[in-house]
Amino acid sequence: MTIPNQTFAIEITELGAASVLKPCQRTLFPLAAGQVLIKVAAAGVNYADVMQRQGIYLPPLGATDIPGLEVSGTIVAMAEDVKNWKLGDAVCALLTGGGYAHYCVADVGSVLPIPAGLNFIEAASLPETFFTVWSNVFERAQLKSGETFLVHGGSGGIGSTAIQLAKAFGATVITTAGSEEKCRFCKSLGADAAINYRTQDFVDEISILTHGKGVDVILDIIGGDYFPRNLKCMATEGRLVQIALQNNIKSEINWLPVLHKRLTITGSTLRGRDAAFKASIAKQLLKHVWPLIKSRQIEPIVHSTFPLIVAYKGHQLIESSQHLGKIILTV
């Protein structure tokens, strides 16, 4: 096929509300070594896109300012050194940006085949959350079979992925969510317990559920006043992984439980990591997780789709916290 020298895209015209997302035309530059060009079929909406639009989470130096961290689609061009793919392959990919477009560039190491039986919309829901959860929960926090795992915000994209992965690998899973409907949804994904944080104190509930022991691993996207409460929930040798700060970037800390329980507090962001790191995660997903998706032991959870040209509607929905699972933009 003929590759255009420009692509339709959605850009952030200024920092602000979802309405600042507008269509534009962008130049497609020649591919660098190790890159492929993907004709986009669908793109995931993530809270990181919202934070970029608000000016909180800016793209890494040298990355495109077009939002969008994950896509599915078809490879239509490759750099000369790319040998393990062919034109026309259906793929999904993790990006440093640029997914809200008809065409996008991806580092080949972050490209994965679409698991058998999935369509483009389902496939676009996978990369950002699965790369994030695997690298933080299983590599950074070293969650093991038989341990107890707490994930906050279990009904969103990260949460619904974390519940399924932790359960598939033998953990007892506890989650928090903001309504009884969301709690039921989390349990349907495999959570052993779901705590409605609007009507229950999750610190007290976790103490009851774990008979005072606490949880071994926490994955938190909230931050702020959740931080000191998380410390109270942690078992001896517990690990807290902070991957987002939706409430507040600052927290008070009482160091005594950290010392007494020998706690590990860590965190990470994925977008700025180098291509080699992301490629290593892709290999782990292909080996350990893609077979579980193929066999439907783990399901992609898509709540809503919107045409790319009205990407702002996807942002409005994710900010409303009314979704269960992922929000996808279709091309």
Image (cartoon, rainbow, N blue to C red):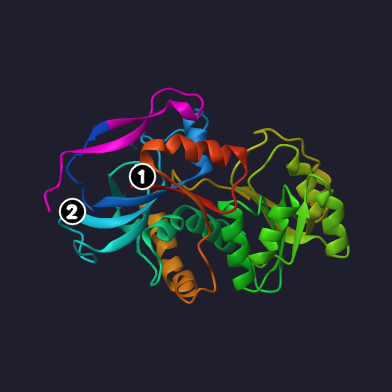
Mark toward the viewer: 1 or 2: 1
Give x and y (percent) for residue 219: 65, 53
Q: Residue at x 66, y 65 (%)?
A: 188
Tag 2: amino acid: Ala
Mark 2 nearby-residue class (10 Å; few <14, some 14–19, many ≥20): some
Q: Is residue 200 visible?
A: yes
Give x and y (percent) for residue 153: 66, 50
Q: Residue at x 21, y 60 (%)?
A: 82
Return the residue found at the far left. Answer: 2
Residue 52, compared with residue 330, is above or below; it is above
**Chain-order first, disc 1 or disc 2:** 2
Give x and y (percent) for residue 105: 28, 47
Q: Is residue 49 a member of the stretch shown in magenta?
A: no
Pointer 1 residue:
99
Question: Quarter of the image holding residue 254?
Answer: top right
Horizontal side of residue 1 vs 109, given as left or right: left
Q: Is residue 20 a member of the stretch shown in magenta?
A: yes
Give x and y (percent) for residue 6: 19, 37
- Judging from the image, what secondary structure is the residue with disc 1 in? loop
Q: Is residue 97 visible?
A: no
Horizontal side of residue 315 vs 183, given as left or right: left
Q: Which mark is residue 79?
A: 2
Question: Quarter of the image holding residue 133?
Answer: bottom right
Magenta part of the protein: which range?
1-24
Q: Residue at x 40, y 71 (%)?
A: 117
Task: Tell me whether the residue at label 1 lies in contact with that at label 2, contact meaning CB atoms closer than 8 angstroms.
Answer: no
The one nearer the camera, 223 or 303, is: 303
Residue 253, compared with residue 19, is above or below; it is below
